[in-house]
Amino acid sequence: AAIDYLLLAHGHGCQDCEGMCCFNLSSHSTSIWVNIQKLQELMKDIKV
């Protein structure tokens, strides 16, 4: 699952690495990727 998450976090879906993903992200990979990008943008605004 960790490899699946890392692939997804870098914009790759299960279709890019056949046989490696243990769960189906094909219908949600785009929206999850968009959400990850939004979180990264919001993190830039956090000041310590």
Image (tube, rainbow, N blue to C red):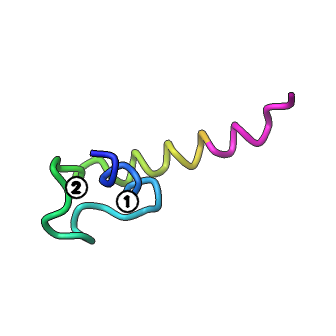
As helix, strand or loop, the secondary structure at mark 1 comes to helix
Q: How far apart are marks 2 and 1 (CA)?
A: 13 Å
Q: Tell me if residue 19 is in the magenta stretch.
A: no
Number of callouts = 2
Give the farthest residue toward the front.
Answer: 2
Task: Tell me, for residue 7, which label it has, or none.
Answer: 1
Crowd rating for badge 1 (residues with CA inside 10 Å; few <14, some 14–19, many 20+) = some
Nearer to us of marks 2 and 1 is 1
Mark 2 / mark 1, whichever is N-terminal: 1
As helix, strand or loop, the secondary structure at mark 2 comes to loop
Where residue 16 appears, as percent x and y from the top left, is: 27, 71
Q: Name the residue under label 2.
A: 26
Amino acid type at image mark 1: Leu
Where residue 18 appears, as percent x and y from the top left, is: 16, 69
The residue depicted at 43 percent of the width and 62 percent of the height is: 11
The residue depicted at 40 percent of the width and 45 percent of the height is: 32
Q: Give the range drawn in magenta.
A: 40-48
Query: In the rendered image, which quarter contains the N terminus?
Result: top left
Give the farthest residue toward the right.
Answer: 48
Query: In the rendered image, which quarter contains the C terminus?
Result: top right
Q: Tell me if residue 41 is in the magenta stretch.
A: yes
Crowd rating for badge 2 (residues with CA inside 10 Å; few <14, some 14–19, many 20+) = few
Where residue 15 appears, as percent x and y from the top left, is: 22, 68
The residue depicted at 29 percent of the width and 47 percent of the height is: 28
